[in-house]
Amino acid sequence: MSGHRPHLWQITCSALLAALLVTVPADWLSGAAVAADGCTTDGGVRASTCRLADGQSVEATLDAANPSRVFRVDVLAADTSASFELSATGGSTKISVTDWRGEVLASGLRADSAPSIVLNVTLPQPGAYGVLVAGDAPPDTPTFRVKASLATLPVAMRPVWPPLLGQPDGLLTGERQQIKTPRGGTSAAGVAVARALGSPPDGIVADFTLVSDVRFEHIVGPSALTVRFRFEPEAGGGTGYVLSLDPFGGVVSLDSFEEGQRRAVVAHKPLPIMPSSERPNRLVVQATGPSIAATLDGQPILDATDDRFPRGLIAVGVVTWSDPVAVTFDHLMVVTTADR
């Protein structure tokens, strides 16, 4: 989609889509989570993948049936320094750290004669990463151990969503949301679907960071993924902010809304990169006091200042003015400072 340039009619449709969104009620999630008795180390990075917590070790085995194992590590801030110590005996073992697209950020090889290896890497964006261990461990010494160490954050962060994110284990219920419009849009009516990440009072936050690996099912016409935040669901449409990212028009916008009345904070700014239906893009939205910023795959896409609404709920959604559309919000995470 990098060849598309927004035309006047596309921008007009995008504005109408965003206007419709603020009047559509959200389907609220209860915020309940189900604890998992165990975790898995096969496949990709999922809610059930065994996690590496700071300062803790995990053990697993390699054999002919399972020549590789995958773990996940969740970081709460950008440019987090991390180290992973891999220990084993016999054979050779490789450890790799992958990003949200499965691309290798760093890797290291433990040779036959080395008892351990330490892999140092900077994790550029907050969110989930994969840690892959593979090798040719002999049958008599198939066990390996991985220990993670993460740099201490200058400001204490408190995980808000998923509910068990702040614990070293447990199923991360709700971290993957696939949101679909039930029908396409027309000139007479728009379609929007939204899901809140929490319910009052636990879902209400002031300063926060939202992270999600987003992917459109297909991009065939004017449509947008949306993030509503500092949102109060009052009569007449409520109050708050809505960020809209339109891959067809290639623009991002930020509006405030109050009882159906909208005010542009950032109007249809061109995107430096185009979201894709082929692979996920990591979206990060941050609000600190009056400062509001967003990045896509680490590239700044929006920076604004507005102090009308200091706190509220967060909701993710999708809206369309053309064919039905679906967006997957994966590895969805919300954190806030410990005192907010």
Image: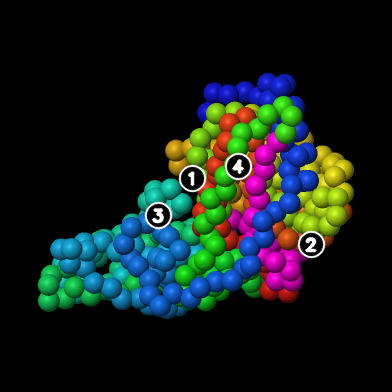
Q: Are marks 1 and 2 in contact (CB under 8 Å)?
A: no
Upstream in sequence: badge 1 or badge 2: 1
The structure residue drawn at horizontal position 78% and vertical position 39%, both measured from the top left corner, is 19
Residue 293 magenta: no
Magenta highlight range: 190-211
Considering the numbered disc 1 on the image, is that residue within a helix, a strand or a loop? loop
How was the colour assigned to the protein in this rendering? rainbow
Q: Are marks 3 and 1 in contact (CB under 8 Å)?
A: no
User: CA separation, marks 3 and 4?
Assistant: 32 Å
Within-10-Å neighbours for mark 1: few <14, some 14–19, many 20+: many
Residue 71, percent from left and from top: 38, 65
Q: Which mark is residue 11?
A: none
Which tag is nearer the camera, tag 2 or tag 3?
2
User: CA separation, marks 2 and 3?
Assistant: 34 Å
- What is the three-letter code of the residue carrying label 1? Pro
Q: Which mark is residue 311?
A: 2
Which tag is nearer the camera, tag 1 or tag 4?
4
Upstream in sequence: badge 2 or badge 3: 3
Residue 295, percent from left and from top: 62, 47
List the residue tagged with mark 1: 280
- What is the three-letter code of the residue carrying label 2? Arg
Within-10-Å neighbours for mark 3: few <14, some 14–19, many 20+: some
Residue 198 magenta: yes
Considering the numbered disc 3 on the image, is that residue within a helix, a strand or a loop? strand
- What is the three-letter code of the residue carrying label 3? Thr
User: CA separation, marks 2 and 4?
Assistant: 28 Å
Upstream in sequence: badge 2 or badge 4: 4
Q: Tell me if 166 is positioned left or right of 238 in this view.
A: left
The structure residue drawn at horizontal position 37% and vertical position 56%, both measured from the top left corner, is 44
